[in-house]
C-alpha cells in the first residue's frame, strides 16, 4: 500500500524535532531530510536513542576527508585505564557547527549501556558537553563555527577487547557519520604479559627540535584508599629517580632483571647507585630526573604540593623512565618504563596521564609491607603485582579484581625549542600559532638563566574592539653566567576587547579546586570554603567570570548543646586481653575542648568491647604479641633491627613453625664523614738567598666534611730556613715588616747609585706551576747597570718565592 505523502512529511518533521538535541542545529529540519534508524526493539532505558545510527539520505558531499578524528600519538593499542587526548578537527578552510563523539566496544550496536567503552572527560564546558539523552556521548555545547574540539578519553579496564571511536560532523545542512575512514579510530587493548619485556618503540623518532616537559607525581597510597595492613608509622615514597634517554638504554622493564641500582631503590629506597648507573650511560641520557622523598606517603595538596621535575627530550633521546619505592615494602615500586613522547606525526606529545599499580623488583620474597628480609635466590624477573599473589598481601582480592592505583603521574609539555617539523598541530594554541600573521619566536632562553614559570596572561588593556595589549611576567631566579645576558621578564601580545576576535574565544582555563578548609565552627553548623585560580585568561582578552571560591555548610558534633564538648577521634584498639578464647579490648579518646558552660563533658571517652581469639588448647601456636622493635644495629646509616615473640602454648600440642623473630632494615641519618686531605708536597725553595727566610709546603682537600664530620686541617705550612749568613751589608734591614723591607730597598738603591750599581724593579710574578692543589710562583730583581769595580752585595740578582693555587682540585 502507498502511504499518504502528508503522513510521510509529518513523520519527517517529527524526526527533525527529536534530533534537535542531537545536532543542536535548525539546519537539519530546514533541509527537509528524512532519517532512518535501526529497529527499536533493541532500545534500552533511553528508548534506543544512543543506538540510532543517523545518516542523511540523498547525495552526500565527498569532502568528508576534510574532517579527522585523532587520538594523540595515533596509538594502535590502548593501555587499560590510561587517559588519552582525543581531537576532532577540520582542515582549513573547512569548519563544522555540530558533532557527536562515542566510543563503542567492537561488534556492539550501542543499544545497551555496557556496549560503550571507557569514559570521556570534558576539557572545555563552553565547547563540549555530554548528551542529555545519551550520557555516554559527547556533543557541542553551542552551535557555532568551529575548527577543532578536544576531550579526554580514559580507556576501559583490562579484557575489554577492541574499541572503536566514532564521530559525526554537522556542516551547514550535511551530516557526515563515518563507519570507516578519517572519522573512525579503532584501537585494541595493549597486551602486557608478565613473562615478556615491556613493549619497545618500533619506529625511530622523526620529531624536530627539542621539547621540555614537567612530570608531576601524585601519590594516592593512603590508609583510606588501601586500608589493609597499611603501615601507619613509616609509610613514605622514596626519592624519585629517572631519566630521559634513548632506546639503547633500558632503566627497567617488565620481564627484565633489576640492576644493582634498581635493587637499592626497591629494597632501601636509596637512589644513589641508580643515579650513578644513569650518568654512566653518557650520550644515551639527556636529563637525569630527581624528586625528593615524601614522608608520610600521602598528605592533602593544600598541605604539601605534589613533587615535580622538569626534563628535556630530543629526536634520539625521546623516552622517559623513572621509579620510586613505596615503603616500607619488600621490593615494591611504581614508575614509567620507556614512555615515548615522540608522536608518529613527528611532533611531541602534549600530555600523558598514567595511573600506577606497584610492581615487584624480583629481589625479595616478602609478601606484606613489613615482611622480614628474605632475598629471592635466584633473582626473579620484574613483574606487576596482582590481587591474587598471596592471601597475606595487602592487595589481595579473592575475586582477582584490579588493584586500586597507588599513584598517578602526569607528564605535560611546557615548551618547545628549535624548528618543529610536525604538520598536524597538537592543541588549540598551536592552531592559533599556525594561522596567526605574526608568529611568536621560539623561546631562546639560555640554559644559564633560571626563571620562574610565566604568570597567566592579564586581561586585555582594551575593552572595545580597538587593538590593545595584554601582559604576562616571570621572575629571574638565578643567572649562572654573568657574561651571558638573560632575556626579558615581561611578555606582551596584541589583543582586542571581549567578543571582537574572529573565533570569539572566551574560555577560561581554571586550576583544580583546592581541598576544603576546616569548618569555621568547632560545634554545630558552620561554613567551609575552597578556592581555585585562573591558569589562563581567555584568548580574546576578556575577563574570567567563572567563580574562584566556593562555600558550603558543614556540621561538627551535630547534637551541639551548651554543655556539649569537642573530642578527638577514637584511638586504636588495644590488644585483646586474652591470647586465646574470649577477651576484652578497649580504646580511648580525649576531650579537646570542655563545654562552654563549664559543666562536665558528657561524651564517652572510653569504649570497651569483646574480642575472640583462637580457641584455647586447640592449636599448637599460641604466641605472645610481637615485642617492640630493637634499636637499629648501627648509630648512623643503614642497619638492621629485630623483634621477638615467645611460644606460649604447651609443647605437647604439636610443633609450631611460626617465626619467633623478625628482622628488617633500618635507616638512620647519614654517618659523619671527616675531612680527607692529601699528603704534604715537598718543601719549596727558601725565599731568601741569604739570611733568614722561609719555605712552604701544601696539601689539598680530597673530601669535604659531611654530616657533622671533623673539619679540615691546615693546608699550608711554613718553616724557617737559612741558606748562608749574609754579609754585614746583606744583613742590614733584614726584617719582617713591609715597611722595613721598603726602607731596605731604598737604602740598597741609594747604595747602588753611590757604588756604581743600579737595580731593575721587581719583575712580575711568574705563572703558578699548578692550576690547583698548591703550586709555586717566582719573581726576580736583576742589576740594570753594574761596574766592574763594584763589589757591593746589593748588585747581585735576587729571587722571591710564594705559594699559589692552594685550593683543592
Image (cartoon, rainbow, N blue to C red):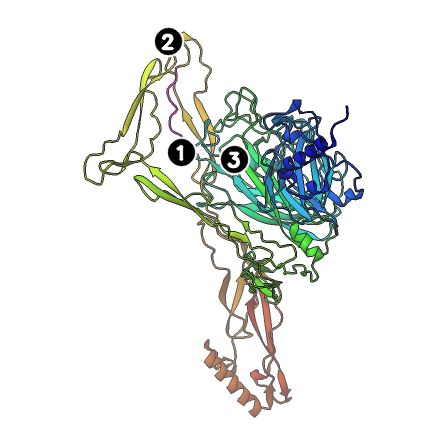
- Magenta residues span 622-630
Mark 3 touches mark 2? (CB < 8 Å):
no
Q: Nearer the viewer, residue 721 or 62?
A: 62
Residue 154 left/right relative to 327? right
Question: x, y (%) of residue 506?
Answer: 58, 53
Mark toward the start of the polypeptide (2 vs 1): 2
Say few, some or many: other residues with alpha carbon within 10 Å of mark 1 (under 14 / 14 to 19 / 20 or more). Answer: few
Residue at the spot of label 3? 326
Mark toward the start of the polypeptide (3 vs 2): 3
**In the image, is residue 85 above or below residue 504?**
above
Helix, strand or loop under label 3: strand
**In the image, is residue 574 above or below residue 456?**
above
Q: Nearer the viewer, residue 520 or 473?
A: 520
Residue at the spot of label 1? 631
Tell me the distance, in whole angstroms, between the alpha carbons under discs 1 and 3: 23 Å
Helix, strand or loop under label 1: loop
Amino acid at each position: 500500500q502507498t502511504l499518504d505523502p502528508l503522513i510521510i512529511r509529518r513523520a519527517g518533521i517529527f524526526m527533525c524535532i527529536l534530533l534537535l538535541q542531537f545536532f543542536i542545529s535548525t539546519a537539519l529540519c530546514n533541509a527537509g531530510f528524512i532519517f532512518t534508524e535501526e529497529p527499536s526493539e533493541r532500545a534500552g532505558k533511553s528508548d534506543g536513542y544512543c543506538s540510532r545510527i543517523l545518516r542523511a539520505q540523498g547525495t552526500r558531499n565527498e569532502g568528508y576527508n576534510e574532517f579527522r578524528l585523532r587520538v594523540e600519538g595515533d596509538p594502535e593499542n590502548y593501555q587499560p585505564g590510561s587517559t588519552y587526548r582525543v581531537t576532532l578537527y577540520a582542515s582549513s578552510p573547512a569548519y563544522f557547527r555540530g558533532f557527536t563523539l562515542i566510543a563503542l566496544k567492537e561488534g556492539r550496536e550501542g543499544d545497551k549501556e555496557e556496549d560503550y567503552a571507557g569514559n570521556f572527560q570534558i576539557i572545555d564546558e563552553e565547547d563540549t558537553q555530554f548528551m542529555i539523552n545519551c550520557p555516554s556521548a559527547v556533543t557541542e555545547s553551542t552551535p557555532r563555527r568551529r575548527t577543532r574540539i578536544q576531550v579526554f578519553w580514559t580507556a576501559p579496564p583490562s579484557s575489554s577487547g577492541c574499541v572503536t571511536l566514532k564521530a559525526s560532523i554537522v556542516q551547514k545542512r550535511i551530516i557526515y557519520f563515518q563507519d570507516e575512514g578519517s572519522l573512525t579510530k579503532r584501537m585494541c587493548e595493549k597486551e602486557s604479559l608478565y613473562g615478556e619485556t615491556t613493549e619497545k618503540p618500533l619506529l625511530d623518532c622523526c620529531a624536530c627540535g627539542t621539547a621540555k616537559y614537567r612530570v608531576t607525581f601524585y601519590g594516592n597510597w593512603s590508609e583510606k584508599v588501601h586500608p589493609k595492613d597499611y603501615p601507619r608509622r613509616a609509610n613514605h615514597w622514596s626519592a624519585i629517580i629517572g631519566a630521559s634517554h634513548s632506546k639503547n638504554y633500558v632503566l627497567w622493564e617488565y620481564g627484565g632483571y633489576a640492576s644493582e641500582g634498581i635493587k637499592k631503590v626497591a629494597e632501601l629506597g636509596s637512589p644513589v647507585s641508580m643515579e650513578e648507573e644513569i650518568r654512566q650511560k653518557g650520550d644515551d641520557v639527556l636529563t637525569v630526573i630527581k624528586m625528593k622523598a615524601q614522608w608520610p606517603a600521602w598528605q592533602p595538596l593544600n598541605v604539601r604540593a605534589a613533587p615535580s621535575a622538569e626534563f628535556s627530550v630530543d629526536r634520539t633521546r625521546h623516552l622517559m623512565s623513572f621509579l620510586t619505592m613505596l615503603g616500607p615494602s619488600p621490593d615494591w615500586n611504581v614508575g614509567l618504563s620507556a614512555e615515548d613522547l615522540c608522536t608518529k606525526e613527528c611532533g611531541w606529545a602534549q600530555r600523558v596521564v598514567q595511573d600506577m599499580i606497584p610492581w615487584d623488583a624480583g629481589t625479595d620474597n616478602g609478601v606484606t609491607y613489613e615482611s622480614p628480609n628474605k632475598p629471592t635466590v635466584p633473582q626473579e624477573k620484574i613483574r606487576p603485582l596482582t590481587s591474587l599473589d598471596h592471601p597475606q598481601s595487602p592487595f589481595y582480592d579473592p575475586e582477582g579484581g584490579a588493584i586500586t592505583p597507588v599513584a598517578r603521574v602526569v607528564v605535560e609539555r611546557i615548551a618547545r625549542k628549535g624548528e618543529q617539523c610536525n604538520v598536524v598541530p597538537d592543541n588549540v594554541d598551536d592552531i592559533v600559532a599556525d594561522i596567526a600573521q605574526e608568529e611568536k619566536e621560539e623561546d631562546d632562553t639560555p640554559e644559564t638563566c633560571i626563571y620562574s614559570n610565566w604568570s597567566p596572561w592579564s586581561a586585555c588593556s582594551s575593552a572595545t574592539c580597538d587593538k590593545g595589549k595584554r601582559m604576562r611576567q616571570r621572575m629571574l631566579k638565578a643567572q649562572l653566567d654573568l657574561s651571558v645576558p638573560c632575556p626579558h621578564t615581561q611578555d606582551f601580545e596584541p589583543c582586542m576587547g571581549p567578543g571582537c576576535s574572529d573565533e570569539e574565544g572566551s574560555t577560561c582555563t581554571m586550576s583544580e579546586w583546592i581541598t576544603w578548609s576546616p569548618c569555621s565552627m568547632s560545634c554545630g553548623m558552620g561554613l567551609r570554603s575552597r578556592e581555585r585560580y585562573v591558569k589562563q585568561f581567555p584568548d580574546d582578552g576578556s575577563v574570567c567570570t567563572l567563580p574562584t571560591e566556593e562555600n558550603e555548610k558543614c556540621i561538627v558534633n551535630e547534637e551541639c548543646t551548651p554543655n556539649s564538648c569537642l573530642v578527638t577521634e577514637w584511638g586504636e584498639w588495644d590488644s585483646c586481653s586474652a591470647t586465646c578464647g574470649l577477651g576484652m579490648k578497649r580504646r580511648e579518646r580525649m576531650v579537646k575542648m570542655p563545654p562552654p558552660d563549664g559543666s562536665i563533658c558528657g561524651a564517652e571517652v572510653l569504649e570497651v568491647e569483646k574480642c575472640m581469639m583462637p580457641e584455647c588448647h586447640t592449636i599448637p601456636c599460641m604466641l605472645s604479641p610481637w615485642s617492640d622493635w630493637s634499636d637499629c644495629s648501627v648509630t648512623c646509616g643503614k642497619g638492621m633491627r629485630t623483634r621477638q615473640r615467645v611460644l606460649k602454648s604447651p609443647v605437647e600440642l604439636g610443633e609450631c613453625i611460626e617465626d619467633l623473630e623478625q628482622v628488617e632494615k633500618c635507616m638512620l641519618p647519614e654517618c659523619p664523614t671527616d675531612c680527607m686531605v692529601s699528603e704534604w708536597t715537598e718543601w719549596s725553595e727558601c725565599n731568601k738567598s741569604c739570611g733568614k727566610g722561609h719555605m712552604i709546603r701544601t696539601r689539598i682537600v680530597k673530601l669535604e666534611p659531611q654530616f657533622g664530620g671533623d673539619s679540615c686541617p691546615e693546608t699550608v705550612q711554613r718553616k724557617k730556613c737559612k741558606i748562608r749568613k749574609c754579609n754585614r751589608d746583606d744583613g742590614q734591614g733584614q726584617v719582617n715588616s713591609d715597611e722595613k723591607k721598603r726602607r731596605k730597598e731604598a737604602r740598597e738603591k741609594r747604595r747602588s747609585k753611590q757604588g756604581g750599581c743600579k737595580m731593575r724593579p721587581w719583575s712580575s710574578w711568574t705563572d703558578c706551576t699548578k692550576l690547583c692543589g698548591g703550586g709555586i710562583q717566582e719573581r726576580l730583581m736583576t742589576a740594570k747597570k753594574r761596574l766592574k769595580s763594584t763589589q757591593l752585595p746589593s748588585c747581585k740578582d735576587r729571587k722571591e718565592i710564594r705559594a699559589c693555587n692552594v685550593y683543592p682540585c
